[in-house]
Amino acid sequence: MKFKLKENHILLLIILYSLFLRIIYLDSDSMWIDETISATAAKSILLHGSPILESGVSYNRAIIFHYLMAFFILIFGGDFGARFISVIFGALTVYLAYKFSKKFIKKNNLIFPILIALSSLEIIYSKQARFYQAFQFFYFLSFYLFYKIAILKEKLFSKKWLDYLFLIASVYFSIHLQTMGYIIIPLFVLIYIINFFNKSLLKNKGFILFAILGLYFIYLIFARMISNLDYDLINRVVLYFNLYSSYYFNYLPLLVFLALGLIFLKNKKFVLSLLSYSIIPFVGILFVRSFATRYEYFIIFPFFFFIANCLTKIRFSYAILLVMILAFYGSVFDLDGIKHPNLDISMPSADYKAAYEFIKGSNLSIVSSWTPASTWYGEGADYALKYSISGLSDDWMFGNVTDTFANALVIQNVSVFPKNVLVVLDEQAKNKVSSDYLEYFSINCSKEFTAYNIEVLKCE
């Protein structure tokens, strides 16, 4: 009997290869600052049964995600275990891309999952001990389920209530992972209007209740945004737009394929629905006071969806896909895993792992410029160096006496700097602490160890 390679078999190979790209080198680099926060929360779950930090404060953000992370740390240990949960969501996103293609493109359905599987950004975020990959998955799973159930009136299960339960669960996890998830409800209202608007819709009580719920979530979002407004708003939006544009500069040549993909989709209501669901939050993030490319990363999914749609509509689509991957290899796509991800300025990283390995067993007190790393990689810290990490208020991290993560004594100014200590000083702290500290370090401290973006000082 002759074996015939079916689409499902090839899809399985694509998913397995995507897993390989996401697992290889998974623990090669030390965690960057946000990762150490999640890893510390998961470590606390294993120690105490809940994410209660050394200070007694409970880290309740994305709590289900952190329990799952704790489970994999228990199995695999270390950075590998902490990051493995994102590997799973990365592979699930590849499968979701296939489902999108099968439902909304309906031709050459493997192109979209291939693009997601080989995307450098998708691989990078699937290797992080943070919930950005999980959010992208649930955000677009929510769109897929809503459009299939509420717009196309198709079933997932034999019981209709199970369909809606599945949808509600997906929306809940999106909100649970990121505040941006709240925008899903008003966007669902907008999508429903795009597809079904007529005068009779305004008389439908179910729709009116749904719309009121959507308006309530819009109120919550805008109330939070207004509280962050300042006189430099316009300048900041322009600056962030330029920064995000420069970060995605390598993707600009692919915009031609994206534009053609938009044109080639016959269902213009669907196009408008997906564009609204993607672009509205993308623009909204420009108004957030902190610049962070990880907030905008979710847009990569629809970006490649429209490119995939373009490729499926032209001759020799898989040959052109291969040329595209090879032409943008190393910038947009990756084929062998990324050993050392090139993180941007909004993701401060340093070799915390090496620094805390160096001071392991020391009898001296430890001063840490980033205490979550001291808790994850070391045995905590005795003192915390206080400075503005984000450029905004960091009161949630530093109390009047001790910090949140390691319960370390907060050094309020250089005049009370402790004697006979080891200082673990990363590059971002070095760039942001006052000049008084740098002067003190140059006079009273000697450099004992140096690694990527970090140094250990011994201060007498």
Image (cartoon, rainbow, N blue to C red):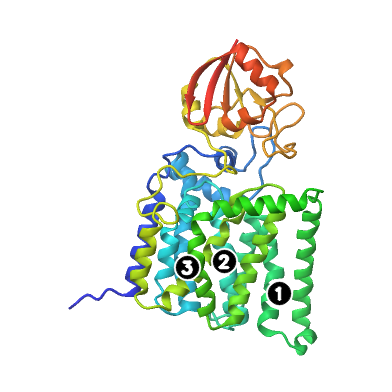
Q: Is residue 2 visible?
A: yes
Q: Secondary structure at mark 1?
A: helix
**Mark pair 1, 3: CA separation:** 24 Å
User: What's under tag 2, amino acid-wise?
Assistant: Phe
Quick check: marks 3 and 2 in contact, CB under 8 Å? no
User: What's under tag 1, amino acid-wise?
Assistant: Val
Q: Is residue 288 visible?
A: no
How many numbered marks appear?
3
What residue appears at the point 74 percent right and 88 percent down from the top-left corner? 198
What residue appears at the point 50 percent right and 74 percent down from the top-left corner? 261
User: What's under tag 3, amino acid-wise?
Assistant: Ala
Task: Looking at the image, tell me whether mark 3 or mark 2 is earlier in sequence order.
Answer: 3
Residue to which mark 1 is pinned: 189
Residue to which mark 2 is pinned: 140
Q: Position of residue 255 (x, y in %)?
A: 52, 66
**Mark pair 1, 2: CA separation:** 16 Å
